[in-house]
Image: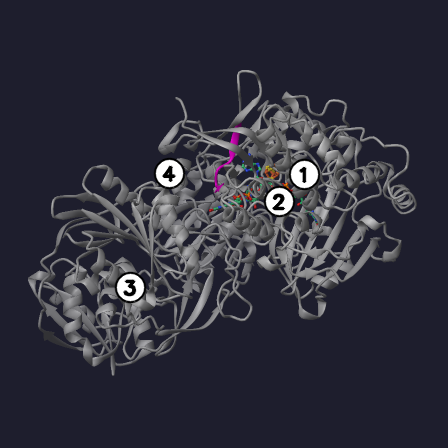
Amino acid sequence: MSVLLIAEHNNKEVKPFTFNAITAASQIDQDLHVLLIGSKADDVAKSLSEVPLVKKVLHIDHEIYENYIAENYTAAILKHADKYSHIICSANTFGKNLMPRVAALLDISQVSDIIKVISPDTFLRPIYAGNAFATVKSNDEKKCVTIRPTSFEAAETTGGSAEIEKIDAADQSENTKFINREEIKSDRPELGTARIVISGGRGLQSGENFKLITDVADKLNAAIGASRAAVDAGYITNEHQVGQTGKVVVPDLYIAVGISGAIQHLAGMKESKVIVAINKDGEAPIFSVADYGLEADLFEALPQFLEELNKLNTIQK
Amino acid sequence: MKILVAVKRVIDYNVQIRVKEDGSGVVTDNVKMSTNPPDDNAIEEAVKIKESGKASEIIAVTVGEEKAQETVRKALAVGADRGIHVKVDGTIEPLAVSKILKKIVEKENPDLVFMGKQAIDDDCNQTGQMLAAHLNWPQATFASKIEVNDKSLKVTREVDEGLETIEVNTPAIITCDLRLNEPRYASLPNIMKAKKKPIEQINASDLEVDTNPRIEHIKIEEPPKRKAGIKVASVEELVQKLKNEAKVI
Amino acid sequence: MSREVMEYDVVIVGGGPSGLSTAIKLKQLNPDINVCLLEKASEIGAHILSGNVFETRALDELLPNWKDLNPPIKTKVNKEKFLFLGKTKKISWPTWLLPKVQQNHNNYIISLANLCRWLAEQAESLGVEIFPGFPASEVLYNDDGSVKGVATQDMGLDKEGNKKDGYEPGMELHAKVTVFAEGCRGHLGKELIKKFDLDKGKDPQQYGIGFKEIWELKEENHDEGLVMHTAGWPLDNSTYGGSFVYHAENKQIFLGYVIGLDYKNPHLSPFDEFQKFKTHPAIKSILEGGKRISFGARALIEGGFQSLPKMFMPGALLVGCDAGTLNMPKIKGSHTAMKSGMIAAETIIDHIKSSKELSIYEDKFKKSWVYKELYEARNVKPSFSWGLILGIIFTGIDQILFKGRLPFTLKHKHADHETLKPASEMPKIDYPKPDNIITFDKTSSVYLTGTNHAENQPVHLQLKDKDLPIKYTLGKYDEPAQRYCPVGVYEVQKENDVEKFVINSQNCIHCKTCDIKEPSQNITWVTPEGGGGPKYGNM
Ligand SMILES: Cc1cc2nc3c(=O)[nH]c(=O)nc-3n(C[C@H](O)[C@H](O)[C@H](O)COP(=O)(O)OP(=O)(O)OC[C@H]3O[C@@H](n4cnc5c(N)ncnc54)[C@H](O)[C@@H]3O)c2cc1C
Ligand SMILES: Cc1cc2nc3c(=O)[nH]c(=O)nc-3n(C[C@H](O)[C@H](O)[C@H](O)COP(=O)(O)OP(=O)(O)OC[C@H]3O[C@@H](n4cnc5c(N)ncnc54)[C@H](O)[C@@H]3O)c2cc1C
Ligand code: SF4
């Protein structure tokens, strides 16, 4: 049987995490179909069909799907679910909201937030906020799985030409109404979701010196983090704190500047894909988790870093 | 209006969990347990609604072993009126919990069910949504603001892009985010009063719900330790590596 | 603003062995008496840290059928060792030559925290009302000056002391008798001793800091029931201290180190001495292949007989280590703490029923075996002020030949905060870097304690003079708080070249060392918001 992936989109474009989920889904089974539930979303269907890993796009187009409502999505999915061995989506607020509703109605015990596909029925998932990993095997006949997007590469988006099949809508729920969505736009990405985070610690020595961090963050379109010591010293407010009692971040790139790397700080960033440490103490514990360590005085290194970045003609956003 | 609040007993979030050597789970003996943090927000919201005169009764329910009662007591100490403890031994999956809660809902007929958005032990994030599905009720997950109207609620949800507002008709399931409110402290006199409030005990086995696990835990292990990478000699080298080797900038 | 008031017959402050024994005994003697017990930890046991080799004498008296009540008392001591450590060598001391007080047959290796959890269950089943998460923060007095009760800590104040959302004022608990059972260096006990001059004519109190780690060992290194103590390295001859290694159940050992807080060198770091101790070949070989699973520290009260204050005052009693009933040569205080609580309970019953004076507590105490124990042990600790070697020789004569009955009493001469010498006069100590296998740094150690304090609350480590640390203590003693605090609460940081004294109060594990050792007594430990502090499991 094939696997069915539920796409997240805004009727104009595919939301990026869907591509990560596609990679994971294709590791479960190559025969991957994507279900697109939307309203006037032909462009989205087209881009999904161009993803080489996708074998088929099922497209339900109806005005009741103009906004994403879990109740309506669930009904639509259930209408078409029986042919599939797995139903999959990303474990962000979209998929977390949706999948359990689907699973319950199929009487399936869902496997949440997997970080690795071990076999079509066995997965690795973090529990206790990442402090332990569980290998779990689903004994349900059909499986509902959500995928931690940051644990899988995004799939190629071009080169494919999957068939697009239009299918029927389901009934609309009377009891839930969408009112509005306020997208929070700020000059800087959110710490929790940013692709790059640059954090400063007590090595910065003052709030004013955090400008060195801000300048680099601007250049890299990065979010700004901090150690507790920097927060306690009043260099920066506590919503920037990363760690055990702050935020847990999993960016592609985490740059720790003037941070010693106490275990409580590591608890908040050690799952980052690439870690850079800039510290003048060569024996600071942060170096034991850093992919790239630079033993240097931050007051010299940061301006140089900015200069080097300026020399690059492109920077990924 | 009657509000049911589901509360779960989990390892206290300050405790550093320790994985058992034989891979069968984590150590829970003599470990400090507490109410799942967002469940405190769920109770608080219910109490606030009751204080505003819009609700008449709050029932706290937990599903778990004998000691799970402590979380119900705590809920009673901050304002729930009575408690229900559905006794099960060992852990059970969210699917089974949601089926049990469905039975409780059918018995109690609440207008609202408040739950936490996610339990910090299994991190499943399923129970509320599953209960909503079983009851065919609307759901509002990750709620960070709730406005109670006559027959409906306006709920602001924390979603990836920012904030989303939806309106759900009652009866409904709400799962609460930590940002929803600031849970109050239980005062001494209220803790004493809570000791006298009733907690009804129900055996899960009497509810005729299939609680058999569907998911096998093959192995619980510590996350792999990260290894040290390399030291670079200069800022220039660092930027080159990030650009060409790690490909992150 | 007036606080809510509740009336009890007896209010007990602290849920350690002494407080819980008081509560149980009270209820046994009079089931109708209403007893309330306050504990600052989030649950009973979460702030208890102890060795612990347990002598059951008091428990036998309190709950004669304890063996039938499924107590967490499982591992009987079956073997003993005593080692003198040199830098790399060790000398084993024959156990038959150990003073009787240091022999442990018939004792058990237990987790005192678990014992307290179990005692709390017994107390609750007798009807004692136990409230964990509620520190007593203030003593209340009647107009005639007698103790009226205590008030619990306000909850929900911000850093500046303003009320936050959800602010919950403390409440007043009034009692016929209030029992202070806060353990070593109780912060209300300290106030009472001063106010009622309870230590008049006594020697200054003596303290130690005790560390404990729990390790899970490789099977072949574990020897359930073995009790081992060491003296000597890494401490120099003039510093009082030693280690304990107790092989408990489940392949675990309780490994600890106690250092007298009368040490002189401000450069000494008790935490690092303990870490260094583990690198001794005789210890390292036990730990290798094992894993550290818990860490913690707590001060012990060591003054004993000579420093024991008067334990009664109008309206209140002191019990256990809040008074100082620990038997130092035995390094045991649990059984004596329990017994003192039981005697206090008998006193209170007499006091309430037949209006006997609370002073009968002292008479009863003097007639008990605790008093005899403390009397016989009295000269051991002070003799070590002559150094380890002379101390041992004297102790041998005193304890083995004379069984503690020599016709004189040695004095404790100084309070612990008076003993530091200026930093410039004392040698610096170079501690090895932690290897993260056998030895660790403070931050990864505090991580295991599970300690935390709600952010944005008043700092519970108060400085009498905010400028003193930098202005005076730094220059004279190189600010020893940086070293004596076992978890790095105190730091001296340079900010734009200006030195600043930083207090990371969230890290505090309530050991009370700073309150004891600060040379100018400039630091006062007060109770933080309820539930804060460590979350010890089976310590
Ligand atoms: C219960 C609890 C919870 C905690 N939660 C958190 C948490 O959530 N997040 C967190 O971060 N911490 C947390 N901590 C605190 C943690 O233990 C550390 O104290 C903190 O992370 C240290 O911050 P830091 O690395 O900035 O400071 P420090 O440890 O002082 O390190 C500063 C570093 O800067 C370097 N440096 C100094 N000057 C320069 C320079 N000119 N150039 C280059 N490098 C320089 C130094 O070599 C040093 O390594 C918690 C602690 C406890 C007990
Ligand atoms: C490292 C170490 C090893 C030891 N080894 C042994 C041993 O092997 N055998 C042995 O018998 N003894 C040993 N002891 C001594 C023993 O632990 C103590 O003598 C015993 O715990 C004293 O009991 P207590 O009830 O007086 O005080 P504690 O056990 O200290 O209990 C006091 C309780 O009161 C609470 N409290 C304090 N202040 C307040 C307040 N203001 N409001 C509310 N609650 C408060 C505390 O949180 C705590 O729970 C050891 C001690 C240490 C530190
Ligand atoms: S601050 Fe004081 S009481 Fe707290 S851990 Fe440090 S020395 Fe102990």
What is the distance, in whole Å, between disc 2 and disc 4 at their CAs? Answer: 27 Å
| Tags 3 and 2 both on a single chain | no
What is the distance, in whole Å, between disc 4 and disc 1 at their CAs? Answer: 32 Å
Of helix, strand and loop, which one carries label 2? helix
Quadrant in the rendering for residue C507: top right
Some atom of ligand 2 lies within 8 Å of the CB belonging to the residue at label 1? yes
Q: Amino acid at mark 2?
A: Pro
Query: Residue at point 81% right, 28% down?
Result: C413
Chain letter of disc 1 in the image: C
> In which quadrant will I find the C terminus of chain A?
bottom left
Residue to which mark 1 is pinned: C340
Residue to which mark 3 is pinned: B100
Residue to which mark 4 is pinned: B190
- The residue range painted magenta reads C130-139
Is residue C137 shown in magenta? yes
In the rendered view, does C181 fall on the left or right side of C385? left
Q: Is residue C126 above or below residue C425?
A: below
> In which quadrant will I find the N terminus of chain A?
bottom left
Question: Within 10 angstroms of label 2, few (less than 14), some, or many (20 or more) residues?
Answer: many
Coordinates of residue B35 in the picture (x, y in percent): 39, 51
Q: Is residue C366 above or below residue A196?
A: above
What is the distance, in whole Å, between disc 3 and disc 4 at their CAs? Answer: 29 Å
Contact flag, marks 3 and 1 (Cβ < 8 Å)? no
